[in-house]
Image: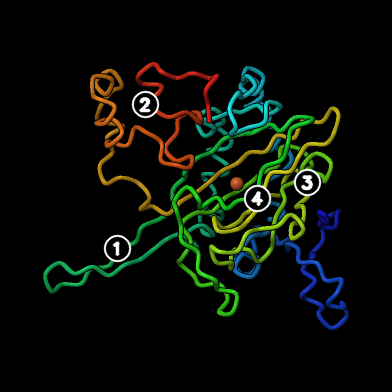
Amino acid sequence: MVISVPFPPQAVSLSDKPDIMPAAIQTPSLQRVEFTDFEKVVAAIEKDGAVILQNFTTPEVVERVNDEVKSYLDADKPWKGKLFPPETRRCTRLVGRSDTVRQEWIGSDKLFGILDHFLSKTTRIFYDDVPTVHTTRPILSTASTIDVRAGAAGQRLHRDDKVHHFDHLDTIKTGYIRSVDVSMSLLVPGVQSTEENGATLVIPGSHLWGDERAPKRTEAVQACMVPGEALLFLGSFYHAGGANRTADQNRPVHGLFFCGGTHRAEENVYMEFDNEQVKTWSEKEQSRMGYATSSPNLGFVDFVSPMHIINGTYDPNHLV
Ligand SMILES: [Fe+2]
């Protein structure tokens, strides 16, 4: 059974009123917090693993982004592999195709203030006996719009930090431990998301679970949102895109995914060598230079392995 987050928006953390809610009917759910209230946003994420940001942006800005990606969504073809249901359409390379996403959201210092809090890392390093201090800051990992159209199946419950093979300790007893996360995800709905059109399934508190615990559908609630709101969550937080059970509604969602600044190779070979040169290398050499995707789903171009694109072996009928 999937239990819905109350809608319209309200602060829905029932743990705020433990004395009046019988334990048997308490349902964990996400809090709605004003985007500008940094302390409350951080506290909500530490407690639940995720938060719904009120007034993250405006409906007008969302509509502008919707307009900028529309031609790319309309030109996209049904996916033939397992990664997406055929009823979905994609606009990849989002920060280049939507100036608004790049300027308004990637350019948001408020957003990066929150990301910095969870993903930045400062380390003391000795050079001989001289201590120096260095800070690495988060970067965009990937961004795309996925239009989940009528009839599309939902995702399986998963953690986004799976791509970085993150090890999760059980921290239910200790509570959240800062600086252990490697990624965060931001989902900005392009239209009002509802239970019927597939609002994201979420499991509040699942960021504290160890790797041995499997998520269950019965533990999930749906994070329904209106345009202008956004769902921000840690990479360790279990969630899934919901099934679009409507007959005629499109549910575009603009997804921005961030990772710690160290999650890249030391040398940026992708700027140093052009594809024609790389094409002359053996597949073993290409793979060892980072041109093959890392399983699962890391290092792709338009969700395809760079090696297939460079070598001309891209086959849309044999996608994973
Ligand atoms: Fe995800």
**Label 2 amino acid?**
Met
In space, the residues marked 1 and 2 are separated at their CA atoms by 34 Å
For disc 3, the neighbor class at 10 Å (few under 14, some 14 to 19, many from 20) is many
In space, the residues marked 3 and 2 are separated at their CA atoms by 40 Å
Left/right of residue 23 with respect to residue 75 in the rendered view: right
The residue sitting at 73% across, 63% down in the picture is 31
Q: Earlier in the sequence, mark 3 or mark 2?
A: 3
Q: Which residue is mark 3?
A: 226
In space, the residues marked 2 and 4 are separated at their CA atoms by 29 Å
Q: Which residue is mark 2?
A: 307
Image quarter hosting the N terminus: bottom right
Left/right of residue 229 with respect to residue 26 in the rendered view: left
Residue 202 in picture, x, y percent from top left:
70, 55
Q: Which residue is mark 1?
A: 134
Q: Which residue is mark 4?
A: 157
- Indicate which label's residue lies in the foreground, 1 or 2: 2
Rendered image quadrant of residue 80: top right
For disc 2, the neighbor class at 10 Å (few under 14, some 14 to 19, many from 20) is many
Number of marks in the image? 4
Residue 156 in picture, x, y percent from top left:
66, 46
Residue 84 in picture, x, y percent from top left:
63, 32
